[in-house]
């Protein structure tokens, strides 16, 4: 729910969010933190200056939540579980808000409402050096040093830097053209032209994206898997983790003229995983768990990579790790508490398969969840909406 500075600070938790939380807590066995994860709310930002009156927190650990300025009168919680930040029992007055804003101004901090200090857009001193033009364009695109992001203007400066030979600017321009960021519509053909130019100037990320478009035929009349994999290989040999992963996948599945060789594929996956590529960690873990390309299965080692990939945000790894924890695969014993954590993390990451699995578990009361038909119905609707979006359709409320 948005508000201007005269009406107080931005309140991220909408009335509908609060109603959804209360509705979900009316059914047994679902906790406040579980509801927050399922609803995809952010504990660090969405509960500041929120009206939480009457919500039950039970004995949960709320250390990750920021309730600054929130109204929690009538709530049920254990003081042992309260976070360390300030929690207000009543609504704050306008005087309080004005005092906070003045304090922020004196301290040089941006207020939680109103304009940010010192971030007004000023193009009076535009750089001319290619490196400086590229850096200026990046700041425009992200909003750094400016009041807000300006992707359209950023593209003008990316283009200037690109024409002066900056490979990173060529790549950024190509990515924005491909994703219609700052442009009215995507232009894959023009994007590929800039990917080509950037790759020719040594940008390995451009090599990977160009290779992917060649393999898939995106922006080209015909796909060219052989040439695409060549770009993967060049990027991989120059140390690009995504290039290593894509090359490994091409070798594992036999894309282009590659002969399927799981052992070599795993070598590339491991090289990319060592460079913190979460997708490579996941593929390597699956092959380790099933013994594909290895002398024998190694579920314990697989779980190590699944854990690292999950902590980097890979939802497929989260789901597989949750299933392994539930069944005790690669562990000394099952751990339902940790399994629940990773199931909900995968749900929160919009993994459709995980959402459906967790929905079934809530529906039938399967470990590590207890029966909650209402939550199961909510999750199935969410999975359906995500499937429609992935297919390019419109979700109707």
Image: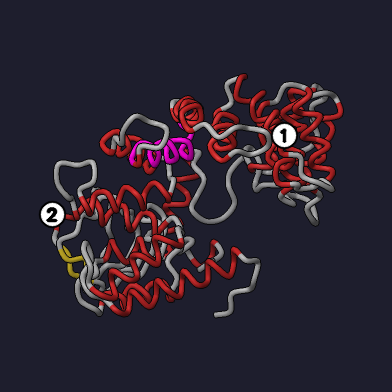
Image coordinates of residue 352 in percent, x first then y, are 46, 62
The residue sitting at 32% across, 71% down in the picture is 360
Residue at screen point 77% across, 34% down: 195
Q: Residue at x 37, y 78 (%)?
A: 377
Query: Is there any visible trace of residue 202 in the rendered image?
Result: yes
Q: Nearer the viewer, residue 6 or 231?
A: 231
| Tag of residue 80 | 2
Q: Is residue 205 above or below residue 382?
A: above
| In contact (CB < 8 Å): disc 1 and disc 2 | no
Q: Main secondary structure of the magenta part?
A: helix
Residue 284 falls inside the magenta stretch: yes
* Quadrant in the picture for residue 90: bottom left
Asked if residue 131 lies in the magenta stretch, the reply is no
Q: Which disc, if any, is residue 226?
A: 1
**Foreground: 40 or 75?**
40
Marks 1 and 2, the one that precedes in the sequence: 2
Residue 385, how many percent across, how many down?
52, 71
Residue 329 at x, y percent in the picture: 23, 46
Q: Residue furthest top?
A: 238
Q: Residue furthest right?
A: 163
Give the crowd class for mark 2: few <14, some 14-19, many >=20 residues within 10 Å.
few
Q: Is residue 268 above or below residue 150?
A: above
Q: Which residues are magenta?
A: 276-289
Instruction: State left or right for residue 279 relative to residue 362.
Output: right
Position of residue 9 measured from the top left corner of the image (x, y, whole percent): 47, 61
Q: Quadrant of residue 136?
A: top right
In the picture, measured across the screen, residue 371 lies left or right of residue 272, that is left
Q: Is residue 370 above or below residue 123?
A: below
From the image, state whether disc 1 or disc 2 is nearer to you. Answer: 1
């Amino acid at each position: 729910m948005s508000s201007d500075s005269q009406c107080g600070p931005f309140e991220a938790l909408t009335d509908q969010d609060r109603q959804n939380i209360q509705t979900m807590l009316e059914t047994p066995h679902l906790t406040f933190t579980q509801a927050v994860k399922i609803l995809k709310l952010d504990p660090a930002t969405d509960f500041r200056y929120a009206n939480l009156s009457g919500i039950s927190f039970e004995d949960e650990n709320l250390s990750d939540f920021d309730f600054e300025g929130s109204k929690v009168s009538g709530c049920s919680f254990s003081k042992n579980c309260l976070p360390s930040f300030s929690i207000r029992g009543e609504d704050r007055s306008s005087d309080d808000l004005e005092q906070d804003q003045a304090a922020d101004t004196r301290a040089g901090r941006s207020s939680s409402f109103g304009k940010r200090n010192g971030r007004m857009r000023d193009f009076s001193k535009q750089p001319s050096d290619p490196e400086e033009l590229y850096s200026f364009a990046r700041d425009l695109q992200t909003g750094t040093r400016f009041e807000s992001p300006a992707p359209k203007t950023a593209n003008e400066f990316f283009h200037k830097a690109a024409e002066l030979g900056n490979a990173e600017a060529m790549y950024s321009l190509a990515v924005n053209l491909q994703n219609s960021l700052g442009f009215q519509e995507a232009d894959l053909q023009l994007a590929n032209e800039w990917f080509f130019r950037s790759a020719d100037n040594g940008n390995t990320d451009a090599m990977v994206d160009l290779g992917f478009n060649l393999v898939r035929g995106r922006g080209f009349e015909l796909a060219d898997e052989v040439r695409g994999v060549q770009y993967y290989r060049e990027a991989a040999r120059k140390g690009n983790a995504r290039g290593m992963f894509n090359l490994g996948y091409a070798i594992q599945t036999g894309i282009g003229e590659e002969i399927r060789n799981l052992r070599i594929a795993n070598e590339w996956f491991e090289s990319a995983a060592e460079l913190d590529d979460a997708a490579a960690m996941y593929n390597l873990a699956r092959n380790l768990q099933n013994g594909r390309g290895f002398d024998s299965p190694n579920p314990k080692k697989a779980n190590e990579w699944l854990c690292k990939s999950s902590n980097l945000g890979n939802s497929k790894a989260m789901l597989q790790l949750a299933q392994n924890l539930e069944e005790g695969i690669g562990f000394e014993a099952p751990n339902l508490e940790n399994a629940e954590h990773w199931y909900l993390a995968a749900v929160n990451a919009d993994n459709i398969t995980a959402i459906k699995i967790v929905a079934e578990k809530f529906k039938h009361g399967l470990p590590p969840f207890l029966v909650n038909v209402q939550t199961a119905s909510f999750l199935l609707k969410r999975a359906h909406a995500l499937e429609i979006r992935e297919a390019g359709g419109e979700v109707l409320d």
